[in-house]
Every structure is written in C-alpha cells, then in structure tokens.
Image (spheres, rainbow, N blue to C red):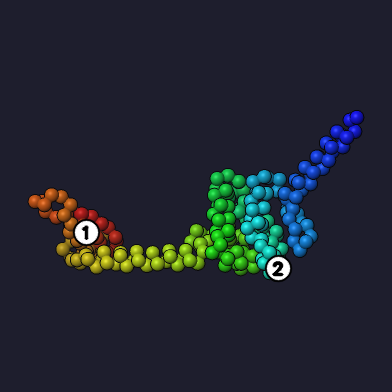
Amino acid sequence: MDAPCTETGNKRKRETANQQENNSQEKRDGKPFKFRITGIPMRDKVRTLFYQVLTTTEERKQEKQKPIHVTVEEIEEELFKSCDKETGKDYQERFRSLYRNLKDAKNASLREAVLSRTILPKDFVVMTPHELANPELKKEREQLRKESIRESKKSVDTQTFSEEFQCRKCGLRKCSFFQMQTRSADEPMTTFVTCHHCGNRWKQ
C-alpha cells in the first residue's frame, strides 16, 4: 500500500532536483550549458539576471567571440572583486545601476559593446553613471552642462573688475565685484568681491 506514496515522493524529489538544476542552466544553440555556480545565492542570482538582460535571440546569433555566459561570469567576478569581495549594499547598488542601464531599450550600444568586449568586464563594472547612460540621455546632460556654463559666464560678465579691492588671502588686486541690496532700502548695498587669482570670495 505504501509503494505508490513512496514512488510519488521520489518523483517530487526528482522534479525538485531538476528544477534546481534548470535554475542554474540556460541553453545556447539548443544545447544546455551550466553557469559556474559560486555557491553564494546573491552572486548566482546576479549572474542569471546579467545573462537574461544580455541575451536576446538576435544577440545569440551575433556571438563572435566568447559565449555570453563566459562574459557574464567575468562581469560578476569583476563586480565582486571591486566591492571587496562582499555582496552587501555596495555590490547590490552597483549591480542595479549596471543592470538598469543594460536593460534600457535606448541603450543597445552599451549591450553591444559589452557583448563584443569593446568594453571589457573589468572596465564595465567601474563605469560612471554618465558613461553608462544611453546616447539620448548623454546628449541631454551635455546640453544642460553647456547651458550651465553659459549662465555662469553671464554671471561673470555682470561683475565689474577693479583694483580697488585687495585680496586678504593672496594680497593681489585682481578682483571683480558686484553689489546687491540684501538689507532694508535705507541701508547701503552689500558688495560681493571675488579674487580671480586665488578664488577667494568675501563680502563687505
């Protein structure tokens, strides 16, 4: 009477074991292969997610150098090393930044560079947010930077250069100033002075 129950239990164990193996297994060209398992759940999850975001049907067809899973293993290994071989907050936040930019639909050029190894794993994991950003976002940020420079230049242009003021820090008289009413109307204006030799600033 116990035989069917025993058989059912064994079947479930086999299914569980197969599922665990499938979790660490993907297929390329119809043939299964396994990731190198680290034994650390967080690291193995990161490897799986990196693989998923870097793998599309078209990208599989275009593989010319190392298989994607090898590149993924190297990326995660370099990320792990760059975080002092810890999987804490720094590791997880860095992974999220890399993953988010790889997943960005407008960032195909980044994925292609990683897959072709134009950007090596060791360089990829230390890229800045600006370097990781998609081309459209980079362009917007560059425009904002230029506008900021123009505004800064306008601010300098409104200042008056004079030798009237002597810098207390470097002793030179290479200063500019502008005046602004910061107190009540019957009080004199406040003078803001900038030394263009050492950058010292003061008001009087």
Query: In the rendered picture of this protein, how many numbered marks are placed on residues?
Result: 2
Q: Residue at x 34, y 64 (%)?
A: 148
Give the residue type at disc 2. Lys
**Within-10-Å neighbours for mark 2: few <14, some 14–19, many 20+:** few
Give the residue type at disc 1. Val
Residue 86 image point, x, y percent: 60, 46
* Residue 63 shows in this picture: no
Residue 1 image point, x, y percent: 91, 29
* Residue 48 shows in this picture: yes
Q: CA distance from mark 2 to mark 1?
A: 64 Å
For residue 201, which quarter of the picture? bottom left
Q: Residue at x 73, y 55 (%)?
A: 26
Q: In this picture, is 18 found above or below 124? A: above
Q: Earlier in the sequence, mark 2 or mark 1?
A: 2
Can you tell which of label 2 and label 1 is closer to the viewer? 2
User: Going by the picture, which residue comes out furthest to the top?
Assistant: 1
Indicate the quadrant containing the C terminus: top left, top right, bottom left or bottom right.
Answer: bottom left
| Residue 70 located left or right of residue 130 | right
Residue 177 image point, x, y percent: 20, 62
Disc 1 element = strand
Residue 69 image point, x, y percent: 70, 59
Disc 2 element = helix
The residue wearing badge 1 is 193
| Residue 166 located left or right of residue 30 | left
| Residue 31 located left or right of residue 193 | right
Q: Which mark is residue 123?
A: none
| Front-lying residue, 200 or 6 | 6
Q: Residue at x 26, y 64 (%)?
A: 155
| Front-lying residue, 81 or 2 | 2
Q: Residue at x 83, y 36 (%)?
A: 9
The residue wearing badge 2 is 61
**Within-10-Å neighbours for mark 1: few <14, some 14–19, many 20+:** many
